[in-house]
Image (tube, rainbow, N blue to C red):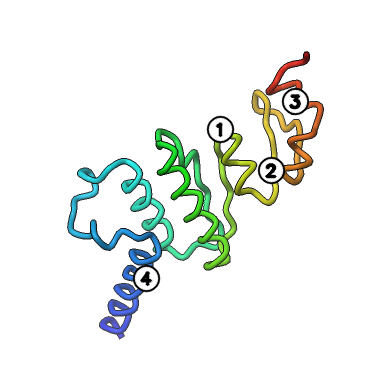
């Protein structure tokens, strides 16, 4: 039984490595990887636990545009392919609006809006809080 479990774990890890497209970096210590790849490894570690809900706290912080695009694709694919619910905390509103199905907006810790990205984007309270009044 222990051997079968070990084999199953190794197969799961291989699927995650393939899913995150990090095969070429498997022997490189994580600390030597570029930042965007380090974040993919972090995502892989979380996926190895097979969560039904994944909380991502600013997963795009410090990334360049290409790395952000890659991470967005992986997050969408995690939701689509694994059926994992993603709770995303992110300050990049472009990312939030592009990949979210439902958005809750906070202003100084208080909820000021919730809904689809289109609903939130058009909400006058959100516009006032984040864009200012003209």
Q: CA distance from mark 4 to mark 1?
A: 30 Å
Q: CA distance from mark 1 to mark 2?
A: 12 Å
Query: Foreground: 25 or 5?
Result: 25
Earlier sequence position, callout 3 versus callout 1: 1
Q: CA distance from mark 4 to mark 2?
A: 30 Å
Q: Residues within 10 Å of mark 4 (few under 14, many from 20)?
A: some
Q: How many marks?
A: 4
Q: Quadrant of the C terminus?
A: top right
The image quarter in which residue 66 lies: top left
Q: Is residue 27 above or below residue 30?
A: below
The image quarter in which residue 7 lies: bottom left
Earlier sequence position, callout 4 versus callout 1: 4
The kind of secondary structure element at disc 3 is helix
Q: What residue sits right under mark 4 in the picture?
A: 15
The kind of secondary structure element at disc 4 is helix
> Any mark on residue 103, and which?
2
Residue with the most extreme top position: 134
> Any mark on residue 127, and which?
3
Do residues under tags 3 and 4 come within 8 Å of each other at their CB atoms?
Answer: no
Q: Residues within 10 Å of mark 1 (few under 14, many from 20)?
A: few
Earlier sequence position, callout 1 versus callout 2: 1
Q: CA distance from mark 3 to mark 1?
A: 15 Å
* Left or right of 3, for residue 122: right
The kind of secondary structure element at disc 2 is strand
Q: What residue sits right under mark 1 in the picture?
A: 91
| Residue depicted at x 44% and y 38% | 65
């Amino acid at each position: 039984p222990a051997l079968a479990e070990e084999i199953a774990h190794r197969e799961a890890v291989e699927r995650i490595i393939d899913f995150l497209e990090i095969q070429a970096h498997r022997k490189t210590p994580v600390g030597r990887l570029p930042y965007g790849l380090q974040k993919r490894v972090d995502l892989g570690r979380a996926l190895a636990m097979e969560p039904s809900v994944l909380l991502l706290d600013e997963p795009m912080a410090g990334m360049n545009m290409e790395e952000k695009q890659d991470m967005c694709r992986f997050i969408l694919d995690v939701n689509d392919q694994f059926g994992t619910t993603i709770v995303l905390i992110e300050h990049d509103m472009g990312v939030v609006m592009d990949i979210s199905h439902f958005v809750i907006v906070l202003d100084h810790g208080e909820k000021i809006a919730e809904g689809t990205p289109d609903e939130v984007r058009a909400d006058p309270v959100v516009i006032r809080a984040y864009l200012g009044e003209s």
